[in-house]
Image: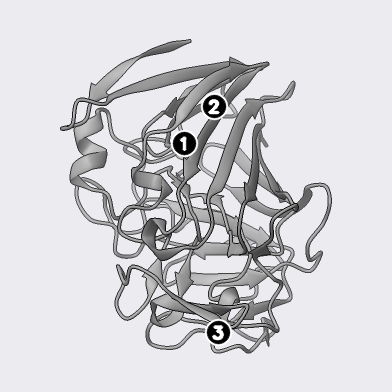
Amino acid sequence: MSEHFGTLSDGTPVHRWTLERAGTRVRVLSYGGIVQSVDVPDRDGRTANVVLGFADLDGYLTHPEPYLGALIGRYANRIAHARFPLDAVTYALEPNNAPGSLHGGARGFDKRVWDVEPVEHGVRLSRVSPHGEEGFPGRLKVSATYTLDASGALRFVYEAVTDAPTVVNLTNHSYFNLGGPGSGDATGHELRLAASRYTPVDADLIPTGELAPVEGSPHDFRTARKTGSGYDHNFVLDKGVTDAPEEVAELHDPATGRVLTVSTTEPGLQVYTADHLGEPFVPCEGVALETQHFPDSPNRPEFPSTVLRPGDVYRSETVYGFSVR
């Protein structure tokens, strides 16, 4: 089901699509591929929205930097010094997070209007990112399919092809608060991660290149514990890159009983506790669990590669499952 949601200043219309299945209701915008809301029940059967979002288009246009619920690309997370080498050529990117590039540049995928078509139990978003957009090489044809499965889980399948060598790293940037609107911050949520290592960062939040053990550090979530605050780190998932999604994380709200599980084909997961989230929200009101390849991989040949070449297909899959206990 689709409806008109607003109009951009250049006259481009924005639509909202509603998906509903097995007790889960999701609203998706053609602007930025944004997941505006995810309504699921708590242990008492009371339904509430568990992701942060705005009620109207103006909210997203006025407050773009939190990337609430957005489809992130061409490159999720940070690239150092806003440049990277590929096949003996150095490409300069938009330094929108000086001195680096963040989430695809000043006008990444989160600020584009996508073509949307219905598919079974969901929608397929698509667009063509032209060669040179935000400095990235290659004409990239991208699709992102959002569906609800028979259990009410929200599945993302990203695919892309290119006509020239490039780098690709796509994710969804939803912030989860399983308590629902008005429940305060999410620091009391309990998080478990299947990650024995993480990538330490420098003062600019760029990985140092080390894959450090979490044991004995504040980054050890191998046993579930409260998220607290102060996290904006990529965790190295023990499973690595996989052909099919495997469960790597669980977030639990003891107050409502809601449980979020994260399964993915990706080798990394960025945990961001949103310490700097501003009005109309409060700091740490949501937790972002962004499945991804590692930050700054184009400058780190020792990290899993994000290079996509002509003739190959980029494919990534992530599933957010919902339950109670």
Give the colouring mode of the picture.
one colour
Q: Secondary structure at mark 2?
A: strand
Instruction: Check the image and report above or below for 119 versus 137.
Output: above
**Residue 218 at least partly seen:** no
Instruction: Please determine whether, in this image, residue 1 is positioned above or below residue 282.
Output: above
Image location of residue 170, percent across then percent down: 56, 53
Q: Earlier in the sequence, mark 2 or mark 3?
A: 2
Q: Which residue is mark 3?
A: 200
- In this picture, residue 152 sits left or right of residue 123: right
Residue drawn at (74%, 21%) of the image = 150
Q: Are marks 1 and 2 in contact (CB under 8 Å)?
A: yes
Quadrant of res 277: bottom left
Q: Quadrant of residue 213?
A: bottom right
Q: Amino acid at mark 3?
A: Pro
Label at residue 50 = 1
- Amino acid marked by disc 2: Val
Residue at point 46%, 36% (across, down): 50
Cα separation between marks 1 and 3: 29 Å
Nearer the camera: disc 2 or disc 3: 3
Helix, strand, or loop for circle 1?
loop
- Give the crowd class for mark 1: few <14, some 14-19, many >=20 residues within 10 Å: many
The amino acid beneath tag 1 is Val
Residue 132 is situated, as x and y percent measured from the top left of the image, at 42, 59
Residue 203 lies left or right of residue 77; in this view the side is left
Image quadrant containing the C terminus: top right
> Mark 1 or mark 3: which is in front?
3
In the foreground, 223 or 34 = 34
Cβ atoms under marks 2 and 3 closer than 8 Å: no
Q: Which residue is mark 2?
A: 40
